[in-house]
Amino acid sequence: MSNAVETLERALGECREGYSLPGAFYSDPGIFELECDAFLKRQWFVAGHQSELPNQGDYVVVEVAGASIILVRGRDGELHAMHNSCRHRGALICVEPKGSVRQLTCRYHAWAYRLDGSLQAWRHMPAGLDKADFGLVRCGVATFEGFIFITLDPANAPDFSTLTAHLKPYWAPYHLAECKVVHRETYHMQANWKLAIENNLECYHCLPSHPEYSSVSGFVRADEKISPAAIEAHAVHRAKLESLLAGLGMPSERSEIRWVGGQLARAGIIPLSEGVSTASKGGEPVAPLLGELLAYNESTTTGAFGFTSYLFAANDYALSVTYIPRDAGRTDVVAKWLVRADAVEGRDYDLDALRWLWDETTKQDKAIIELNARGVETRGYRPGPYAELEGQTAEFVSQYLRLMRETARG
Ligand code: FES
Ligand SMILES: [Fe+2]
């Protein structure tokens, strides 16, 4: 038995239902390797938006869980995703993070691949070998409302349409496929990816850590039971919003969750505070209304696709967040802001105003997630109990442990 499996078994033996994980899960490189195979490879995650690859040959390179993936728009207009490693002796093919190409040519010995990853040309190879056997290794690709999702393990990932079927009505009114990405930010976190996901799935930390987000999101004070008045005000506001959304033919569930193959598929409508138009500094509008919306309705839509991708839409902009595990102790968080395709910077939106709230909030999250990472590495760390407001975090940990137990059993 490998050392990594022994470490995993020992750590699994220390787990307690409803408690945070033992320290080895947040730092051990062997466990990270095992979870890449058991868990991360099977995730569907947001790799981009179709507005980032408008033309044939446009590509981006996405680094995730030890893999480098080329996402490219082919001659047929279809999207293709494949591993960025030549089938000859493995050299990296695309070196730049994005660009546009006619074909994918390896610099080393000039093997050339078509945009769908099939091998087009090689030189002086022995007779008897068939080019058809040496195409680039393919990943799974799917789209949802203009967002491009990838999975590294299409054979074992859940079916994408099953994962997303019930989520469509929540997003349809925003016409996100017709939006464009206007800003990208990568936040490098010195923390294990699970600490970042645990943080994202609960708002128990919102009141102490996100004063700006909490002030525009009335549910935070109500969930915290700050006062009977806050609870009452939020309930009245929510009821009004529900009848408004029903009139528009939109769903209004706060959080509709399904588990598909151990993966989270969640969408929900979250009211803003009364009188707040959008999730911004002071709640003022920051861009033209999206899609079919005719007026601000004081709500936002949020959703999770698996555990590593998160979408958010206010009435006038959208945000995608992808958690990219780099190794046992580092996670990149890639955030992209989107507005209507016809919006013009300076006239219709101001970039600083658009990105302010989520940039501040994500920087605050980075600070607390890194504090968490430092604390769980100390000798004094003992796993602690999750609060009621951390229900989805506890569920994530239990789904994760189920898969890791299967891995330990072999
Ligand atoms: S490694 Fe790519 S052609 Fe040789
Ligand atoms: Fe947060």
Image (tube, rainbow, N blue to C red):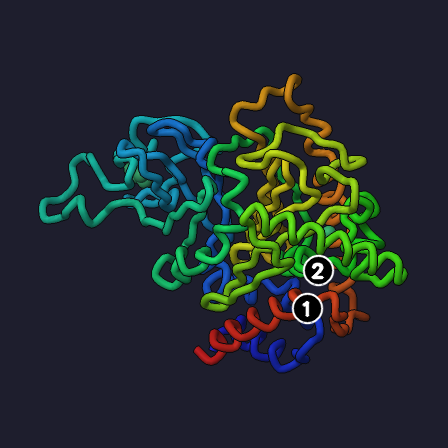
Residue 360 horizontal/vertical position (percent)? 76, 40
Q: Earlier in the sequence, mark 2 or mark 1?
A: 2
* Residues packed near mark 1 inside 10 Å, few (<14), some (14 to 19) or many (20 plus): some
Q: Secondary structure at mark 1?
A: helix
Residue 222, can we see it?
A: yes
Q: Is 239 on the left or on the right of 402, as rendered?
A: right
Determine which quarter of the picture holds residue 125: top left
The kind of residue on which mark 1 rests is: Gly
Instruction: Determine the residue positioned at 62% across, 60% down.
Output: 255
Q: Residue furthest left?
A: 127
27 relative position to 87: left or right: right
Tell me where residue 225 appears, x and y as whole percent: 85, 63
Q: Could you tell me which residue is drawn at 60 percent across and 78 percent down?
A: 12
Where's residue 16, x and y in %?
A: 68, 80
Q: Is residue 162 or residue 135 the one in the foreground?
A: 162
Residue 301: where, in percent of width, then height? 61, 48
Is residue 370 among what the camera can see?
Answer: no
Choose between 53 and 178: the one closer to the eye. Answer: 178
> Which residue matches tag 1?
391
Which residue, given by chain and number where applicable, does mark 2 sit on?
202
Q: Is residue 8 left or right of residue 168?
A: right
Label 2: how many residues lie within 10 Å, few (<14), some (14-19) or many (20+)? some
Picture layout, residue 151 above or below residue 24: above
Q: Amino acid at mark 2?
A: Glu
Quick check: 408 left or right of 288? left
Q: Residue at x 52, y 58 (%)?
A: 306
Image vertical order of residue 341 relative to residue 25, above or below: above
Secondary element at tag 2: loop
Identity of the residue drawn at 27% across and 31% down: 75
